[in-house]
Image (cartoon, helix red, strand yellow):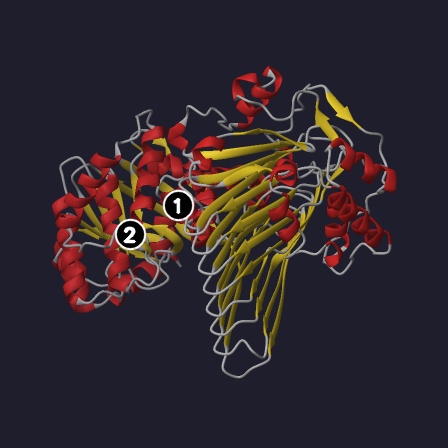
Amino acid sequence: MSEQKRQSEDELLEKVTSSEYKYGFTTDVESDTIPKGLSEDVVRIISAKKNEPEWMLEYRLKAYNAWLEMEEPNWANINYTKPNYQEIIYYSAPKQKPVLDSLDDLDPEMKEMFDKLGISIDEQNKLANVAVDIVMDSVSVATSFKETLAEKGIIFCPISDAIQDHPELVKKYLGSVVPARDNFFSALNAAVFSDGSFCYIPKGVKCPMELSTYFRINEAGTGQFERTLLIADEGSQVSYLEGCTAPMRDENQLHAAVVELIAMDDANIKYSTVQNWYPGNAEGVGGVFNFVTKRGICHKSAKISWTQVETGSAVTWKYPSCILKGDNSIGEFFSVAVTNNRQQADTGTKMIHLGKNTKSTIIAKGISAGKSEGNYRGLVRISKGATNSRNFSQCDSLLMGDKCGSHTFPYIEVKNNSSKVEHEATTSKIGEDQIFYCNQRGIGTEAAIALIVNGYCKDVLNQLPMEFAVEAQKLLEISLEGSVG
Amino acid sequence: MLQIKELKAGIEGNQILKGINLEVNAGEIHAIMGPNGSGKSTLSAVIAGKEEYEVEGGTISFDGKNLLELDPEERAHNGIFLSFQYPVEIPGISVSNFIKTSITEKRKAQGLQTLPTKDLLKMMREKMELLSIKKGYLSRNMNEGFSGGEKKRNEIFQMAMLEPKLAILDETDSGLDIDALRIVANGVNKLRTGDNATIVITHYQRLLDYIVPDFVHVLHNGRIIKSGGKELALELEEKGYDWITKEADKKWA
């Protein structure tokens, strides 16, 4: 490589570090915030603010007590200063009537924020065919298309409403896939979660539109602990998408969510995430700690498919998993994880095969640039009774520049001899020859990288609902602006 | 159209081109022949602007512009096309997507609007017919799993789509069987107009049976040591290179 070339690479890498996070603004909305810190009293205050029934308070207190005895996990390949849990605000709500009768009543400041984020919450905009639930800091502020969905018997609402209106469903399924004691962050979430989305699809119903939740951390010093519970009854089908952004702040903000999916016999759930929390600045100051537990259970012949495009957050710790309990059930995990600058990600999946003839597919694509670290960590466990089961895993990493790192940690446990597990892994760099080839065809270096990266991620991007695939593609381009391999 | 004067260039401190002079005008086909290691591929890479190559002296002007000041993509926008000896794979990107991006970028640089997809597809179909390319090819990923012949045909297809002023075909005949060679050569001939020019770089005379050059140049040790008409290629086929290279070596010793 010539000196000149090296210099121009350095310049480009420099440019990445200065490329700005587009969603870093804050919105001036008055909010109702409780003092920082975590105690039994705080848990009680949150529960009281939500007017929760006694069983819900008990659930929270049990989780809180369990959390007190647990330790923050440190097995992941990430380095960060552990948050001081007494410095975090656990509840903050925009001060306006939280649930609106009509979206026209929305605070104009908030409406402007959503416009800036490019989210259409206008119910008239039926072309998009997406129902949206918006969670800002700790509460849900708007849900669209509620009535259209209700006609089919579909419940799509903030989980705080579901606790009031559908206690039998919440009581039965909350914590059934991710028990409060599952891990440090799930226990914390169970104790203090204040909102999130709830969704129930009745037997045999095919949800007529994409369901989507948009998460936004706004208030300084707050943590976001949302809880999502999605139940697809026998033979039903649903596609669900979540997106997230946060302002640029110098402090680290904690996001510890829990998502539980229940796919009853023959049900089909597709769950997609486009994660774009603030990643911190070039020196690694600020950014969101994204410590999330996502898991789904598949009953007989059910299918759960996780797709994630992870481009944000300073630190990501996240393993969307499938428990393939029912015979002939299917689990899928498609992931693109991008790290740039000083970002760190330890992400992957767990496929737990319990039923016979269960199948799982894992396609994980990591892209590391700048001084970042990307890790894939995945477990494929095939239990004794899961005869004739199959797994195929493919883990690819793409490196840009010579200051980043990428690691793959596959764990495979097979307890019977009629099952088949395949694992493929590759590591590559964008070749200078590829870039020159594109250049020669009139495609500049930046556009060439975007093209090559898109090609590399194609198998995953293809899984996203059409409306979001384009958005995810753009997001990838922005995240990698100026990073040359 | 293209004027190369006293061009000296090399890679990692080794001078490979030692003073090239060449003039190519619209409507002409030039063949550059020469033994292995004579600098043929270096010449095409330097014209296209590959960064690893350092230009140590001389000038290249193209339509009156100083080519050496332009980035590779700007050279492409100005109408220079290089058919690669070893076309690279771009996994996950379809031929149609790649060509669309390429044409869009070129038009953007020229201040033109994006071509409607309908028109682009129509153009692709026409050019596919011209090159006897079968259906289904557009959705294949760029050069992924292509045979040698398919890769070369893909290069010529892109050339047909981009309609360059100057096309440089770098060893396009290598790895082609006789049928593929004939198809590729026919394509090149059909694309020929009075306004564009072609430089054919080849080791063997074979390709020149199909693409008949107006001028033949022999490159040896970084210099053009002999130029002539198409009959020179035939002479080389018959006598080999030794008879002229020996003489040149004596001269430059």
Instruction: Specify the label residue B139 is tagged with.
Output: 2
Residue A377 sits in quarter: bottom right
* Label 1 packing within 10 angstroms: few (<14), some (14-19), many (20+): many
Q: Position of residue A327 (x, y in %)?
A: 49, 70
**From what the image shows, is residue B41 above or below residue A247?**
below
Nearest the eye: A3 or A331: A331
Which chain does the numbered disc 1 sit on? A
**Above/below status of A217 relative to A407:** above
Q: Is residue A66 left or right of residue A442?
A: right
The part of the image, by quadrant, that contains residue B132 is bottom left
Q: Secondary structure at mark 2?
A: loop
Residue located 33% across and 45% down the image: B97
Badge 2: few (under 14), some or many (20 or more) residues near its Cα, within 10 Å?
few
For label 1, the SS is helix
Taking the image as shown, residue B131 lies to the left or right of residue A482, namely: left
Q: Give the residue type at disc 1.
A: Cys
Q: Circle 1 is placed at which residue position?
A: A438
Q: Of tags 2 and 1, which is closer to the observer?
A: 2
